[in-house]
Amino acid sequence: LFAVAPANALVVDLNTEHDGRSVFHITSFGYEADGVFQLDLSNFVLLVPSAHQNEYHETMTKDKLVFVLQHAQSGGVRVEEGSGEGCFHQTDKNLGPNDQVISLPFPVIADKKPLKKTLKISEPGSYHLYFSNCLPGTKIGFKLELTQYNVIAGEKVYLSAGKAVLPTLYGLLCVAFLGTFIAWCIYLCREHKHVVSIHLLMGVVALFKSLTLFSEAFEYHWLKTSGRPHGWNIAFYIFSFLKGMLLFTVIVLIGTGWSYLKPYLTERDKQVMLVVIVVQVMVNVAMVMLDETAPGAIGWLTWRDLLHLLDMLCCCAILLPIVWSIRHLSAASGRDGKAQRDAGRLKQFRKFYMLVVSYIYITRVVVFLLDATLPFEFTWLANVFSECTSLVFYLITGFLFRPRGRNPYLKLDTEEDDDPELNAEPIPMQGSS
């Protein structure tokens, strides 16, 4: 059971109850020299087996219930959570010279007295906060408020040292995507005779991407200045949801050849579309749950793993139509009178397949590795690298499938096509006439 304020706020409120984990990670933050860590603990409860209540006296509990502020040079978390027999903070390999251990005094444990602790960080780096319970068979509960910030030029900066530049960078990226959207609209107006429905949807994706970055820039601005998003996280969730739905839908439609190779979706295409839409809804629900709970909350790891699983399922689903189109075009490439046209289409779809695979690999694997291995002050590079990869993906996709005259392979056929896939019984899209 848990109730947590938004985890992307740097003022973190965590309420946990009946928690039997021996150790769990609560949050991470990148500190500059003279950064400030403030801990405010209240309503601490220690639940012990009824047969052993008299055993947990002051001597028994001394240094057994602690918070550990662990120093590291990169953003990687050493332990997510555990329920084993070993004691996390009493193992030498888990503690370093710059780590801080905050033990809970007995009055806090026995009488629910509040505990307030303020630390000034002397050694810059990435710090991970853990709670460690070395009383086997017990469960704990508490209310915790954490305030973490750096002091730069006399101003409190609530964003982690490696993220403080993100408001400005997201603003610049928003302008870049908005410029891409405007340029795309101008090009569609110039080539309006060759514009089909998929080109309009591609423009809408670019628009919602810029709106997502706009809301994210303001969210990070308020996180930087006050530690809380002031409602901009809600706008980000809405625009991110719409952008994600549209992006994966457009990739599937391009892969099926809808509107520029055939004016309809087959039954198989519609099934893939349905899977992508359903999985994207689940991905966005998992994303919201993940962002709105702190890593220390019970169930956070489950939501994180679910998000990764659903995201990879969606990535696999969007590749299927492209693979099917490549197979059909490969089989049809040797037919009389159509070899040149089919060879052009095949080349285009193979390029698009490699582009999508590269996009998935970079944004799902490379960015994760960068975030985990970069020095704490350069973790912003992972965010920017991910967004720049998206921008390049949008630009190349737009270039490959732009509307233009005399295109031998990106146009609706006016002649009868022998390809059985393109001659399948037309099944209009939902809501079309």
Image (cartoon, grey):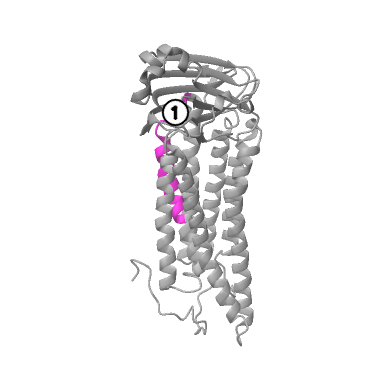
Between residue 206 and residue 4, name the one nearer to us.
4
User: From the viewer's perspective, is residue 282 above or below residue 93?
Assistant: below
Q: Which quarter of the figure has residue 357?
A: bottom right
Toward the front, the furthest residue is 51
Name the residue rendered at 48%, 38% in the picture: 216
Toward the bottom, the furthest residue is 336
Measuring from the top left, give residue 215's x and y in whole percent: 46, 39
User: From the viewer's perspective, is residue 49 above or below residue 400?
Assistant: above
Crowding at dot 1, Cα within 10 Å, few <14 / some 14-19 / many 20+, comes out as many
Measuring from the top left, give residue 392's x and y in whole percent: 61, 52
- Observer able to see residue 59: yes
Between residue 49 and residue 101, name the one nearer to us.
49
Magenta residues span: 226-246
Q: Which amino acid is tagged 1?
A: Arg
Residue 275 sits inside the magenta stretch:
no
Would you say the magenta stretch is mainly helix, strand or loop?
Answer: helix
For label 1, the residue is 228
Horizontally, residue 169 falls left or right of residue 143, namely right
Between residue 179 and residue 321, name the one nearer to us.
321
User: From the viewer's perspective, is residue 238 above or below residue 190?
Assistant: above
Q: Quadrant of the N terminus?
A: top left
Measuring from the top left, give residue 150's x and y in whole percent: 56, 21
Measuring from the top left, give residue 60's x and y in whole percent: 46, 16
Q: Quadrant of the C terminus?
A: bottom left
Image mark count: 1
Name the residue rendered at 45%, 43% in the picture: 302
